[in-house]
Amino acid sequence: MIKVVPESAVLIPDSATLKYSGEIFSVYTWPQKLYSGETATFEMLMRRDTVTAFCLVDNKLIVLDDEQPCRGKKKTLPGGQVDSSDDSTLDSVKREVEEETGYSFKNWKLVKVRQPYTKIEWFIYVYVAWEQTAKKPADPGPGEKIDLSLVSLADFKDLINFKNNVLTENYDLVENVNSLDELTNLSEFKGKQINRTLAQV
């Protein structure tokens, strides 16, 4: 699978051996030569990538109150997991947004990719979506309860200080933005392309 990652991304070597594959994480190990000339066993985790999106509707942003059994209720942007190695991040984010919100959009732009932990090959892809094309009833998965709100850009920035939210993860994208037009005009993320041949969780 070809995907775009940050230039500084830390990746599991193609020569690594899969030691364990769970529901969320896979464990890989490989022999790593050290500066001393000795060899040690190195280890990294891999998990499916995550996609999320700033979705613009009626000059406002979609914010979710997303409740899941494992973590309670949090304020989030729409999004979820890339289901398989055959899915692109764009196809995945379109599917997740439609499932969680019911909205479909004409325009999509990738504006950020980050690797939260360098010991895990896991990337979070952030898109901006605008120009709504359809709206149907939301159909979230059985493991979540979702309430949707449309908020102004100013209110979105105020929500950053709200307890139990993950909006702060992408606050850097909006802190210097003064309108939703400026949000849609953010630069497209470039990074570098990689082709993953390792087994995916």
Image (cartoon, rainbow, N blue to C red):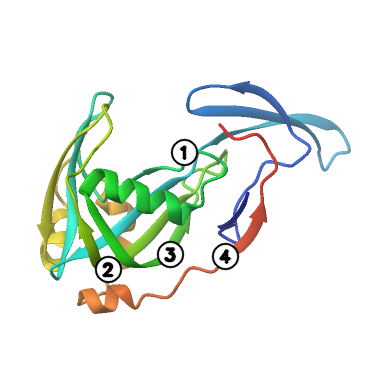
Label 3, label 1: how many angstroms apart (C-alpha)?
18 Å
**Closer to us: 195 or 131:** 131
Q: Quadrant of residue 141?
A: top left
The residue beneath circle 3 is 110
Q: Quadrant of residue 58?
A: bottom left
Q: Which residue is mark 1?
A: 83
Query: Pointer 3 and pointer 1: residues touching (CB < 8 Å)?
Result: no
**What residue sits right under mark 4 in the picture?**
191
Frontmost of labels 4 and 1 is: 1
Callouts 4 and 1 close, C-beta under 8 Å = no
Count of numbered badges drawn on the protein: 4
Q: Could you tell me how far apart the alpha carbons at marks 1 and 2 are, in whole angstroms?
A: 23 Å
Q: Is residue 160 visible?
A: no
**Splitting the image into 4 quarters, where does residue 185 fall?**
bottom left
The amino acid at mark 4 is Gly
As helix, strand or loop, the secondary structure at mark 4 comes to loop
Which quarter of the rendered picture does the C terminus lie within? top right
The amino acid type of the residue labelled 2 equals Trp
Relative image position of residue 67 (x, y in whole percent): 20, 33
Who comes first in sequence, dot 2 or dot 4? Answer: 2
166 sits to left or right of 25: left
Q: Residue at x 33, y 65 (%)?
A: 128
Q: State the residue position of label 2.
A: 130
Residue in the image at 37% along x and 75% along y = 186
Q: Position of residue 149 (x, y in %)?
A: 11, 52
**Alpha-carbon span between mark 4 and mark 3:** 11 Å
